[in-house]
Amino acid sequence: MRWTPFVSVAVVLGLAGCGSYSLSTPSAPRGPAPLPASPISPVQSQTLPPPVAGDPLAPPLGTPQAPVDLAATTPPPAAPSTATEVRRPELSGGWTLASAGESCQLFMSLTTWSGGYRANTRGCASDELKSVGAWDLAGQTVVLKDASGSPVARLSSTAPARFSGQTEISKRGVQFYR
């Protein structure tokens, strides 16, 4: 077969058709069309019970309470653990620490430290609570300790995620909770 200009042009045009080429201006890539909105299950509404006296998380008395919306698909709440059963992994993490009108943060980890495991506080005003540097579990009692391992406070579980007790030196009431 002899190459002629006609054959060359035909080959070039044939190969050009194999690629993707557009003379129009480029546009944003097109993805699949958005999905239509799906219906949401009905929402239930109920009023919260009155606050418990002395609960630091409760709003002041006389504060109007808005109804709480609960989705119908909300799974049933997990069964609460007994107030006396305390395990180290459940104590790890951040807590609110309260004593004698002050409130600050308590952080407990599972990193071993002198006298138990590492702990620290943030935002505490009293020197006693500022000194927390470790914690340990003695039976079912949580012992907050200073960096040398001396006890600062002893607390026992009073409810799930709530511990109450007193400080060692000043004998002030103390609690931590989530």
Image (tube, rainbow, N blue to C red):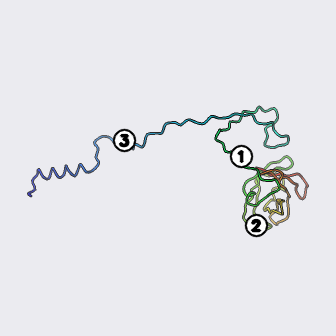
What residue is disc 2 on? 113
Instruction: Name the residue located 60 percent from the left edge and 36 percent from the top edge.
Output: 41
Residue 167 appears left or right of 119: right
Front position in the image: 10 or 36 = 36
Numbered circles on residues, count: 3
Secondary structure of residue under mark 3: loop
Decide: few, some or many residues near mark 1? Use Cα within 10 Å; few <14, some 14-19, many ≥20.
Answer: few
Give coordinates of residue 3: x percent, y percent: 10, 56
Residue 177 appears left or right of 24: right
Give coordinates of residue 106: x percent, y percent: 77, 54
Task: Say which amino acid is labelled 1.
Answer: Pro
Task: Say which amino acid is labelled 3.
Answer: Ser
Decide: few, some or many residues near mark 2? Use Cα within 10 Å; few <14, some 14-19, many ≥20.
Answer: some
Q: Nearer the viewer, mark 1 or mark 3?
A: 1
Instruction: Name the residue located 75 percent from the left edge and 58 percent from the top edge.
Output: 108
Secondary structure of residue under mark 1: loop
What residue is disc 3 on? 27
Give coordinates of residue 6: x percent, y percent: 11, 50
Q: Quadrant of the N terminus?
A: bottom left
Q: Quadrant of residue 40?
A: top right
Secondary structure of residue under mark 2: strand
What residue is disc 1 on? 77
